[in-house]
Image: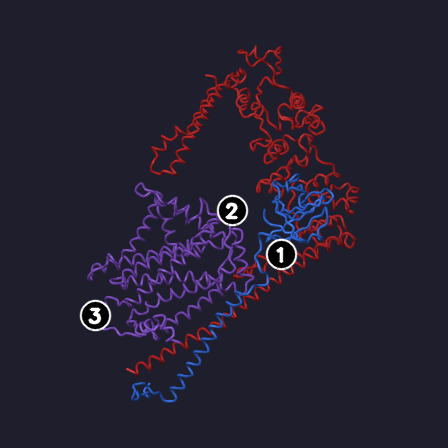
Amino acid sequence: MKNTLPDSTGRTIEPPAVESRRRFLDYLLGTSAVATLGAIVYPIIRFMSPPKIIESTESSVMAAKLNEIPVNSGKIFKFGSKPGILVRTDSGELKAFSAVCTHLECIVQYQPETKQIWCACHNGHYNLNGKNVAGPPPRPLEEFKVNTRGDEIVVSKA
Amino acid sequence: MDREVRASLCNLCVLCVSVVKVTRRNNHHRDAENTEVAQKRILNQPALALMVLLMLFTVASAQKKSSCIECHVKLSDPRLSNPAKLFDNDIHRGRGLSCNDCHGGDPNADTSEAAKDPSKGYLGKPRTLDIPAYCGKCHSDANLMKKFNPSLRVDQENEYYTSVHGRLLKAGEQKVATCISCHTVHGIRAVSDPLSSVYPLNVADTCAKCHGNADYMRAFKIPTDQVTKFKTSVHAKALYNKQDLSAPTCNDCHGNHGAAPPGITSVANVCGQCHARQADLFQTSPHKAAFDQKGLAECITCHSNHDIATPSDQMIGSQQGALCINCHTNGDKGITAAAHMRTRIDELNASINKSSEILSVAERKGMEVSKPKFDLKGATDALTHARVLIHSSSTSEVDKVVAPGLEVAGKGYQAGLDALAELSFRRKGLAVSLVFILFLALLVYLKIRQIETRQRIAK
Amino acid sequence: MQEWLDERLPVSALTEMARKKEVPVHRYSIWYYFGGMTLFLFVVQVVTGILLLLYYRPSAENAFESVQFIITEVKFGWLIRSIHSWSANLMIATLFIHLFSVFFLRAYRRPREMTWVSGVVLLFIAICFGFSGYLLPWNKLAYFATKVGTEIAGVVPIVGHTMLRFLRGGDDVTGATLTRFFGFHVAVLPATATVFIALHVLLVQLHGMSVPPSLKDQNVSKMKFIPNFLLRDLIGWILAIGVLAALAALFPWELGEKADPFAPAPAGIKPEWYFLFMFQTLKYLPAKILGMDGEVLGIMTFNIVALLLFIVPFVDSGPENRKRTLIFNIIGVLVLLYILVMTIIGYVT
């Protein structure tokens, strides 16, 4: 710019107009730099704070509470992205299996009358060890591990 | 040389060569360049010991003589030589039995007269009428059969005479199926052998040999299109395309030895072997009494018997193309119920499609919607359940499952909307932040210009 | 404040060096920015990578679900993850540009041979980063890409099988492979990269920016590193952030389906684009070349070319030689064209 001149010390003196323009630019630069930094830091902070569902649980899940499942009954629960079936036998023992029928993937249910796991789609039957005992199913149901923690029933992959 | 020994030594050669080939291939993988070394290594293989054992065994077993086979194999008439040639694959041979165990005679004799001596028990070829008894000689004897396979049934002969084939045979009809028509003879394989004529995948074609032949069946005045019809059915698709051996073929509905079409009042029981739910619902529905009274066959009146297609929603309702209007009159209780059930099912179906579509759109645009898609399956389950419940003819039953199904489908739709809203939020956010970023970049550029101007002046 | 630090650390010496640093200004100056851009993108990778580490689980049972969790449940997880994946690709792209620009501008010549060598090492480290990181979501595509990739490593004569077992943590690609790749990706490679980046950047500072031979005799004008060049760098980095944000929002990185070792391979598996030219080459090679296995020959050729890359500054040393320069230029252009053409073919077929 033509209207800046060096003074006796060699430093440039700027006329007031240029000086204020520079200050304005610096101010704008400062504030938008801070704003952009904030826009980068804000998502990072939100990212680090724990989300609503705290874990991507797949390996174990709380299937039911002890008082929710009476003797000789069954309950369907969600195990990760697949359905599972929790059964409480006549003798009070707790067993859990994958609820996906090995024939054509319908969801099985517990039959208290026959004390077996039954698939309504094509009349397939599984015993309480998960073994396919009657009807079309070609393979047994996958068995899960059951543990009780206080009054919670926790099912995990075998 | 005895044919058996020759055959055994042939097999031995083949075994040896294939062992060599396999070992060479395995060794090649490990020492690509050392084929010579690999060849030398064969001598140390345990397979060699196995081959020696096999040699001894085949030579030993070849000692058992059968003059029947030796002679018949050389005859020029295929009707006489085929039995001997086919017998190699027969399950009876595998159990140590031979021609004389069924036909009698003396397998050690070297002349035709001596071998086929009636005093040695020679029975020759049985008449068609006698075939069931011929096979039943062993297969109906529990004491004998349990020596070979204790779990085999021994009532096939009895069952057979309850069948249409058996009854007609007793009455003197020769053109019916007997044991050998289905199981073949001389090359009989176990049911579990995929090459057996009675392996589930082959049963329909075996029955079709007679039942699909219009000329052969002319005198019996029954249709001959069952197998062609069956092959278009959903059961055939499961059996042949999906290789689901639990899907029914002829014998699963008609029985195998006691083969007869089920009576019209017992069709539901037969279908109910697998479709238990539908059968139960039907038995307790008003249709059961109505069908029995009208002499209508259960299940097959709507679903047909051989060409059972995947049922469609069109089958139920009050409009053109529905099956209900074939019996019901417009405005009666039944047809109103049918129309109601159809409306509810259509409603649920439409809701599922709508939700499924919006989730697909969201997915294609890059959103992660696998959880909502999975949850939507619950609605599809409800739809399947509703379609089963129509067999009860009860609108309240259908309503009970459709309502929660609609809820699930609704949730899926909402999830789709949420995903698209999130997408739109991200794009707006992007636009805003890009404005800021570009603004900042511009400012930096202006700053550079400013600094460099000052630097230029300072020079 | 500066005095306090100065008493304890050589701060003023460093700041003086930084203040004095100058960058030549000429018509090829634009290529100077790509080294810094690569470094910036690497920093982006480190930051987003550390953030992802807070939620990622490196086991076959949990990896896929944890990534799914990040992009659906964690706030801005989709953004961090997509930026990480996109920035990886952009970094390798700028790295290649940096490599080729240094090659054609002969910036590897004396005394900068070690800078070049450390740079080639960083190229291989970056490729290892890409290969190991790709498997971490444990989806179908990554599983099979890793299977094929490690299979190719196993084809190398003599050491191939050992290499394959070392990479896979066994004979097959399993959860062991995933854990191992994770270890490489977040510990081994970052540590190695840090060492070599420090070396590389230090050497660049010590030797200063090189001037292309064609301009060496001219009196090139210089600009100060601080603030002029650095501010220009900054514009580039700010724009890069904008590009990454846009890519993450408009073209989010796919997750696909969870890997299933028992399912058959999906049709058309392709490795990431920076491996595509090699992959395509191997597809074209005949089964047998002069009695030797075609695939092995192809892989050995690539390995030899990679080794040749190291010795470039030692071959092109000594006084300026027009013929040698020409040969090198031709080789460079041919290699560049080959990579471009093969990559494009790999994409469209």
Q: Position of residue B389 (x, y in %)?
A: 72, 50
Which chain hosts label 3? C
Along the line of sight, which residue is nearer the eye, C45 or B97?
C45
Residue B264, visible in the rendered structure: yes
Instruction: Determine if marks 2 and 3 fall on one subunit.
Output: yes
The colour scheme used to paint the residues is by chain
Q: Residue at x 61, y 28 (%)?
A: B183
| Chain shaded purple | C
Q: Which mark is residue B376?
A: 1
Q: Residue at x 34, y 33 (%)?
A: B37
Q: Which mark is residue C263?
A: 2
Instruction: Determine if marks 1 and 3 fall on one subunit.
Output: no
Q: Which mark is residue B161?
A: none
| Chain shaded blue | A
Along the line of sight, which residue is nearer the eye, C229 or B309?
C229
Which chain hosts label 2? C
B28 on left or right of B188: left
Q: Earlier in the sequence, mark 2 or mark 3?
A: 3
| Element type where label 2 sits in the image | loop
Mark 3, residue position = C217
Q: Nearer the viewer, mark 2 or mark 3?
A: 3
Between marks 1 and 2, how big is the CA–CA gap?
Answer: 25 Å
Q: Position of residue B24 (x, y in %)?
A: 39, 33
Identify which amino acid the numbered label 1 is placed on: Leu
Instruction: Report which quarter residue C44 is drawn in.
Output: bottom left
Along the line of sight, which residue is nearer the eye, C76 or B192?
C76
